[in-house]
Amino acid sequence: MTYILGISAFYHDSAACLIKDGEIIAAAQEERFTRIKHDESYPFHSIKFILDYTGLKLKDIDKIVFYEKPFLKFERLLETYLSVAPRGFKSFSKAMPVWLNEKLFQKYNLIKSLKTNDKSFNNVKNIHFAEHHMSHAASAFYPSPFEEAIILTADGVGEWATTTIAHGIGNHVEILEEIHFPHSLGLLYSAFTYYTGFKVNGGEYKLMGLAPYGQPIYEDKILEYLIDIKDDGSFYLNQDYFDYATGLTMTNKKFDELFGFPRRDPQKIELNKFYMDVAASIQTVTEKIMLNLTKNIRKKYNVKNLCLAGGVALNCVANGKILEEKIFDNIWVQPAAGDAGGSLGSALALWYNEMNNKRTVGEKDSMKCSYLGPEYSDEEVQEILTNIGANYKVYNRNDLIEETAEEIKRGKAIGWFQGRMEFGPRALGSRSIIGDPRSGDMQKNLNLKVKFRESFRPFAPSVLKEDVNEWFDLEIDSPYMLMVSRVKKNKLKNNHEEVKKAEGLKKLDIIKSDIPAVTHVDYTARVQTVKEDNGIYYDLIKKFKEKTGCPIIINTSFNVRGEPIVNTPMDAYKCFMSTNLDCLVIQNCFLRKEDQIKF
Amino acid sequence: MDFIKEFINYFKVRKKFWLLPILMFLVLFGGLIILSQGSAVAPFIYVIF
């Protein structure tokens, strides 16, 4: 038996993952334990969870692999600074001490950190390094249900690569083409995230959610001045308008002048039509680039399956467009497509690509529904709840499902905590807030009263796999909520003109379909298809369908604005008590807000 | 020692030998700056600059 521990850390979204003879055993992101969103620190708690969960010690782990190569990253930094010197000195003087003092000696720092998990750790020779985009490519291909696939990875930047095209067949992945820094689709999107006043490396999905409220009137400007898209699918960014390569910001003064407005200061400037139009424009351009790339690689390599990973693969709207265009027969997206998933990819790359082990492909992917994190037994939960003085009722499985489905039907917002926590940024029915999608004011209420976030943010539907075609234009499985598709025409209200005329956030007030809480203003939804593999979550939706005829519930992550998704029953209880959630279901315990004593 | 071996391997693979003098410079002066944080070497650095 060979155990491999994959680690991603020290940039953002640090995580750890364990595989045993190629089988994914456990994975978790550090932010869930430390409660610091996108935590970049050494994943001490994630590794501790993995060791506790498996009963292993670090000395039992055969190989440890880090998800990127620090020397190559340092090389890129040096060459970039040299190429623009003396410009960039400020950034250079900030970066170098950190690199010379710390990051260049990543292996030794890693050993030091690993010793904090296990004092006796001394297996220095078994520490390996994978290339950043190879980690992404491996995380996309090896768990996929494909024997052969073309793999597209795109993110901000790894070592040099920002976008790669790789070919996966059997147990082997080979990178075929790369686009190098500073030409980066991820950084282009992040530059606009920054410009519209959201946080880089986290706010990108807000920009994506904002896009349908605007019109892409700046698309031509972006294509004319900022990016040159070539016929072969590659692209080049005009560095005159960006500052990220050598400065401390993403965009510069020239960028502001191009659009006629400064970067939005979220404390001072409300989201207005201008920023919505900018969001719509960059989203359209991103889709154009992704479509151009995927069409080209389909033509060039003629492989029918596509695997996606890297931060850009979390742009589910662009993924939906690739699907809609039917460029590939099948698409599979790694649920932890961001850097956290690099921990998984680096481990798999070592096991298959380097150690040349046999890979067996099944009908299903090998991500185990992405339920790879910590779990708590019914007894543990009851003990925790009793100790904190919570009032709860214990139900058997059927009654728990019955009661929860009934409360959803009554329009209640419910915190739902079951089984192992998800790996990846999406809540998939383990740590979710759920509700009735048929309710007209649910989206606004959940956003403002429960999640305390911007009212424009959409919610996703979890739909029974067998009913998905009746409600959405989606022909493939979307178990990880990474595909956006249109709500079926016969489920839409006949008020397109009214929606079209409404400006900006006023679009939100119009009921657009039979499931308004999960229908975005452009009549799309970020669908999660739920199968029997999803266990109790599947049974719950089935029960809701029995009661209402609707096989869909709202599924949004169990957290409030600015906080990571809950991990422990205590996190869940705190979130329940500090928001307007009506009920909380943890394992077989049912809690009602009115029964609780205030904190 | 291992670190130096790894760096030599890096140069063997990447063959970017022109980066070597820049790196030496950075490591030397970077090392001095780091050392200067401890008071023993600090006076010598003030003399140099």
Image (spheres, grey):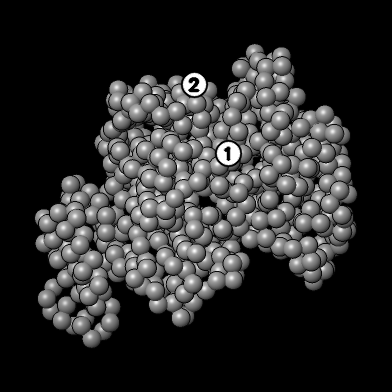
**Residue at mark 2 shares a chain with residue at mark 1:** yes
Q: Can residue A50 be seen at all in this image of the molecule?
A: yes
With respect to residue A30, does A483 lie above or below? above
Amino acid under label 2?
Glu
User: Which of the 4 image quadrants contains residue A448?
Assistant: top right
With respect to residue A477, does A115 lie above or below? below
Of A269 and A217, which appears nearest the observer? Answer: A217
Instruction: State the residue at coordinates (69%, 33%).
Output: A465
Amino acid under label 1?
Glu
Direction from residue A265 to residue A532 in the image, left or right? right
- Report the residue that reaches farthest toward the bottom: B40
Reading the image, the residue beneath label 2 is A325
Of A361 and A82, which appears nearest the observer? Answer: A361
Residue A338: x and y, percent?
A: 47, 47
Instruction: State the residue at coordinates (19%, 53%).
Output: B14
Q: Which mark is residue A235?
A: none
Instruction: State the residue at coordinates (70%, 55%).
Output: A419
Of A359 and A38, which appears nearest the observer? Answer: A359
Residue A99: x and y, percent?
A: 29, 63
Of A388 and A114, which appears nearest the observer? Answer: A114
Q: Chain of mark 1?
A: A
Residue A121: x and y, percent?
A: 44, 77
Number of the front mark, 2 or 1: 1
With respect to residue A576, does A364 lie above or below? above
Q: CA distance from mark 2 to mark 1?
A: 24 Å
Residue A27: x and y, percent?
A: 55, 57
Instruction: State the residue at coordinates (71%, 38%).
Output: A554
Q: Of callouts 2 and 1, which one flags the residue occurring earlier in the amino acid sequence?
A: 2
Reading the image, the residue beneath label 1 is A363
Q: Can residue A292 be seen at all in this image of the molecule?
A: no
